[in-house]
Each structure stands twice: as C-alpha cells, then as structure tokens.
Image (cartoon, rainbow, N blue to C red):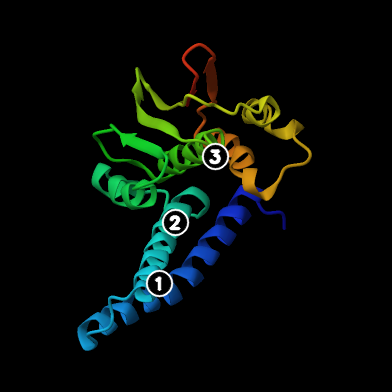
Amino acid sequence: MKHDPVYLATLIGSRICHDLISPIGAIKNGLELLHLSSETSSGPEICLIEESSNNAISRINFFRIAFGMGSKHAELSPDKAQNILLPLFNGSRVVVNWSIETSITRIEAQAIFLSILCLETAMPLGGKIHIGRQKDKTLVKGTSSNFSYNAELWNSLLQPFQWRDIAPAHVHFLLLPLICQQMHSPINLDQFANTKAVNITF
C-alpha cells in the first residue's frame, strides 16, 4: 500500500518532536528542582544548561508545527503563535511580527512556519519577517539589508517536482509547496530588489 510522502514526512516529524520534548522537559524540571534546593544553582554552568534547554524546547515547539502532523480540525490562535515564536526569535537577528488577529487552521500555520524558515535561510545577517493578510491571501514578507537570494532554491517553491538534490538544511523549500498544494492554495512569490524584500503569499 502506497503512502502519501507528505503524510510520512510529517508523521516522522511528529515522532521525533514527541520523543525529544520529554527528556528536554525533564532537564527543565531538574533545573527547577536545583533552584529550589541549592544556593549554588545560579552559577554560569546552570545558566548555560537552562538557556540551552529553553532554546531546545522553543525550537521543538516550532518544528512540531512546521514538520509535524496535526489534527485536521486543530487551530492556532494568535496568542499561541506568539508563545511559540517569541522565545525562539528573542534576541536573534531576525525579528518576527505576527499580525493575524484570528485563529488559523493547523495546515495554514504549518505553511506559515515553513515560509518563516525559507526567509530565515535568506537572512544570514538578520532582517524582519511580517506575517499578515493581503486581501484574501496569507502573506509572509521578509525584508533584509543583506538578502541572500538563491534563485534555484526559491524557484523550487514554484516548481517543487523539478528539484533533484537538496541539502537537509533546505528541506523546508521542498515541503512548503506540497503543503500549499494540500490547501489548494498555490504559492505566489514576489521579489523586490530595490527594497530587498521577498513576499510569499498563498
């Protein structure tokens, strides 16, 4: 029996995120116990472990949406989106602004998070990512003073089945158009060289 490759990919993503979040959560709980039971629990070593575990939890929560499988009836509220994105990008070179004021479907959230990864890839020195609406479409816009635009990568969003070789770090460029196909909402890509911006709409 054949299985949809997108289904298998998101199933694997969900399994990995599920198996990783438990031990990292246990580390977080252990650190909280250390804070309660020891006067020496605020040293640089403990702070480094705590910061690393918080970053790992934030990234797994993001990857769970971007690469995992969710219920068809699940939704992502604006507050939940902010709770996932703010810890991940806090202090980073990339600033993310979420302006969608209503809850969205799980699959739309997945497409948005994959779009964020695509734009982040093209911002080695940082930039801004805006998520909002443009008429009846979802808009994910990236702006940067130093936009690294790999034409072959970005063209793969429009022609996903013509891409033959891709690095693991760029897998989101393959998955995003397939998710948009499932939503019956094709990707539109606009590059603005003068303003150094890229708009992804679907």
- For the residues labelled 1 and 2, the Cα–Cα distance comes to 15 Å
Q: Which residue is mark 3?
A: 179
Does the CB distance between marks 3 and 2 fall below 8 Å?
no
Residue 81 position, x and y percent, is 32, 46
Label at residue 18: none
Q: Quadrant of the N terminus?
A: bottom right
Q: In the rendered structure, which disc, 3 or 1, sits on the residue that comes first in sequence?
A: 1
Q: Earlier in the sequence, mark 1 or mark 2?
A: 1
Q: Which residue is mark 1?
A: 49
Question: Callout 1: few (<14), some (14-19), or many (20+) C-alpha neighbours within 10 Å?
Answer: some
Q: Is 17 situated left or right of 81 in this image?
A: right
Could you tell me which residue is drawn at 56 percent across and 38 percent down? 121
Q: Secondary structure at mark 2?
A: helix
- Residue 185 appears at what percent x and percent y? 50, 28
Figure check: 115 above or below 34: above
* Three-letter code, disc 1: Ile
Residue type at tag 2: Arg
99 on left or right of 186:
left
Please provide percent x and percent y for residue 144. 46, 26
| Quarter of the rendering containing residue 172 | top right
**SS of the residue under disc 3:** helix
**Residue located 44% across and 51% down the image:** 65
**Residue 76, image x, y percentages:** 32, 46
On residue 59, which mark appears? 2
Circle 3 packing at 10 Å, graded few (<14), some (14-19), many (20+), is: some
Give the tally of numbered discs. 3
Q: Quadrant of residue 22?
A: bottom left
